[in-house]
């Protein structure tokens, strides 16, 4: 379904994110017939380019990162014709009058702030000073949204000086993933799961986001952040919210976000003994975290595992184990819901240790599988075996669109439609920092030294022990 005609200004339109994700994503939506051809995409950045130069740059970017299987003949030129460029300095006054002439008042207006957060205030101010933005304009902002509660509050206040909350779209691209939205469909579209979705039937929940990349190339930035700020405070927290929230009364922006906020506020502080921080060591032909960060004395974590609790009736006593890291054995993101064992087995004693496990894969191969217990086929008597009921979306639905719609393009279309459901609200982000800050302050005060782990592993040994001590084990990363 096509969206309305729009003018989208991408501040930082020549940057890595714009070239790798935003513009190839928009091109795919164009190919899918969702983007009206009279829409305008205006790149705005410091580079001294004209529209022709920008179109060349984006043509190359699409060739490199575009990846669409669909027939594109002739379409790329039609897409590039929608592109304009204005050289601009967020902190200066050059270029803004040209921008004002280019951006139309009678179509949907969106401004994507794909620049460092330190420029958000300057951009917001000039969009008003030059009478470009109006009461209906939308702005899109990227992570990181602050590095602690104080800076997040300051950023929110800066944006609030110029835009209302319902104009601000804070992107967490995890929320744009097909499976993440499916999590809500599975929970609230089936009778099967919700009655069991509580501490009576669920033993524990695991959330793993494992990456194989190192921090090389952005080590200096990463070293000031670490896995807790870079991944847990935003992405893992969002996944946790969707798993743990109460059913919203409707699938609407504020209903969903109200429920997510309640989860974050119900999160308990984390016992330092329930946190394992790690740093990857050097491997065969690979450098160590400290080398990549160019900081031989760095105490920043490239891995973290932790056990958290949500203090409410639904989740009392159910641990949530979170884990994320760089340079791990596989690129894999998965949420695992491990149900309790049955109360009484009518089968032989060996056979009561079976469990239902629902796992939700975000990558690779977005999909879900549910482990169920059945009789082992054959004449061997009544022996039980656990088998997966597997559903890989691309296979099950046979729809190539499942594969090609990535999170960014989906979310950008939501911005144009004016749907904030999959974007973080200001109070959510602040609540997440309010939970994160004391945890980080705790290890900083203790001068906690991260444990070394081998590149290509599942993280430090202590992370395995975190679950072993509780008689549980992590799902294998594969
Ligand atoms: P980048 O350094 O590649 O690009 C920065 C862009 O900002 C360039 O187009 C540059 O011209 C423009 N810019 C810089 N200073 C400017 C100024 N004073 N006035 C106008 N334009 C200016 O950065 P990036 O990787 O594209 O990241 C952009 C934002 O997105 C950052 O906030 C980053 O944290 C966030 N982000 C990036 C990624 C990613 O994969 N690259 C992922 C998540 C979030």
Image (cartoon, rainbow, N blue to C red):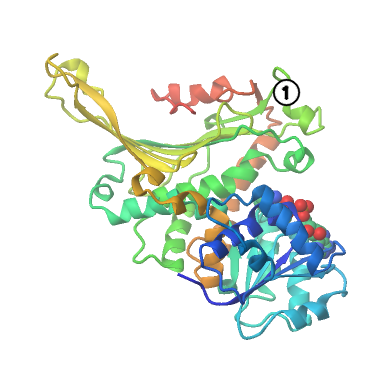
**Image location of residue 451, percent across then percent down:** 65, 24
Tag 1 residue: 286
Residue at image position (37%, 43%) is 395
Q: Residue furthest top?
A: 380
Residue 423 visible, this orientation = no
Secondary structure beneath dot 1 equals loop
Q: Which residue lies furthest to the bottom in this view?
A: 106
Count of residue discs: 1
Residue at image position (55%, 25%) is 458
46 to the left or right of 359: right
**Image location of residue 422, percent across then percent down:** 50, 60
Residue at image position (53%, 52%) is 406
Residue situated in front as seen by the camera: 181 or 348: 181
Residue 442 visible, this orientation = yes
Q: Please determine whether, in this image, residue 20 is positioned above or below residue 338.
A: below
| Neighbourhood count class around disc 1 (C-alpha, 10 Å): few under 14, some 14–19, many 20 upward | few
Residue situated in front as seen by the camera: 463 or 294: 294
22 to the left or right of 423: right
In which quadrant of the rendered image does the N terminus lie?
bottom left
**Image location of residue 183, percent across then percent down:** 39, 50
Quadrant housing residue 324: top right
Ligand 1 is within 8 Å of the C-beta of the residue at disc 1: no
446 to the left or right of 390: right
145 to the left or right of 2: right
Q: In which quarter of the image is ligand 1?
A: bottom right
Q: Please determine whether, in this image, residue 136 is positioned above or below residue 178.
A: below
Quadrant housing residue 282: top right
């Amino acid at each position: 379904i096509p969206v309305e005609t729009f003018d989208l200004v991408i501040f930082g339109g020549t940057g890595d994110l714009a070239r790798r994700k935003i513009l190839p994503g928009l091109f795919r939506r164009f190919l899918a017939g969702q983007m009206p051809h009279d829409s305008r995409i205006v790149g705005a950045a410091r580079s001294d380019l004209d529209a022709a130069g920008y179109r060349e740059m984006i043509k190359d970017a699409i060739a490199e990162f575009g990846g669409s299987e669909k027939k594109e003949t002739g379409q790329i030129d039609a897409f590039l014709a929608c592109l304009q460029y204005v050289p601009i300095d967020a902190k200066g006054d050059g270029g803004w009058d040209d921008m004002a002439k280019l951006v139309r008042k009678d179509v949907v207006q969106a401004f994507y702030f794909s620049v460092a957060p330190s420029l958000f205030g300057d951009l917001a101010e000039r969009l008003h000073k030059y009478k470009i933005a109006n009461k209906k304009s939308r702005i899109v902002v990227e992570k990181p949204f602050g590095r602690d509660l104080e800076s997040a509050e300051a950023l929110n206040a800066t944006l609030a000086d110029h835009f209302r909350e319902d104009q601000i779209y804070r992107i967490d691209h995890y929320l744009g993933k097909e499976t993440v939205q499916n999590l809500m469909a599975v929970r609230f579209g089936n009778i099967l799961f919700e009655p069991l979705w509580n501490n009576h039937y669920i033993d524990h929940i695991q959330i793993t986001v494992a990456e194989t990349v190192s921090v090389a190339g952005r080590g200096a930035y990463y070293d000031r952040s670490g896995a807790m700020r870079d991944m847990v405070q935003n992405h893992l927290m969002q996944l946790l919210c969707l798993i743990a929230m109460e059913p919203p009364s409707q699938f609407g922006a504020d209903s969903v976000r109200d429920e997510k906020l309640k989860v974050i506020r119900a999160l308990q502080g984390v016992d330092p003994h329930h946190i394992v921080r790690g740093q990857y060591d050097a491997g065969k032909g690979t450098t160590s975290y400290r080398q990549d960060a160019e900081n031989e004395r760095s105490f920043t974590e490239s891995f973290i595992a932790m056990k958290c609790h949500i203090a409410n009736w639904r989740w009392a006593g159910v641990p949530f184990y979170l884990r994320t890291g760089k340079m791990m054995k596989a690129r894999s993101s998965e949420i695992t819901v491990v149900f309790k064992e049955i109360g009484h087995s009518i089968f032989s004693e060996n056979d009561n240790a079976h469990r239902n496990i629902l796992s939700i894969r975000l990558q690779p191969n977005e999909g879900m599988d549910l482990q169920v217990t059945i009789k082992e086929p054959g004449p061997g008597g009544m022996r039980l075996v656990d088998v997966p009921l597997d559903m890989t979306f691309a296979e099950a639905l046979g729809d190539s669109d499942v594969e090609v719609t990535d999170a960014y393009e989906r979310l950008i279309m939501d911005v144009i439609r004016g749907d904030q459901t999959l974007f973080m609200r200001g109070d959510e982000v602040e609540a997440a920092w309010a939970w994160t800050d004391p945890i980080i302050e705790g290890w900083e005060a203790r001068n906690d030294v991260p444990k070394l782990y081998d590149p290509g592993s599942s993280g430090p040994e202590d992370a395995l022990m975190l679950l072993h001590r509780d008689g549980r084990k992590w799902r294998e990363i594969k």
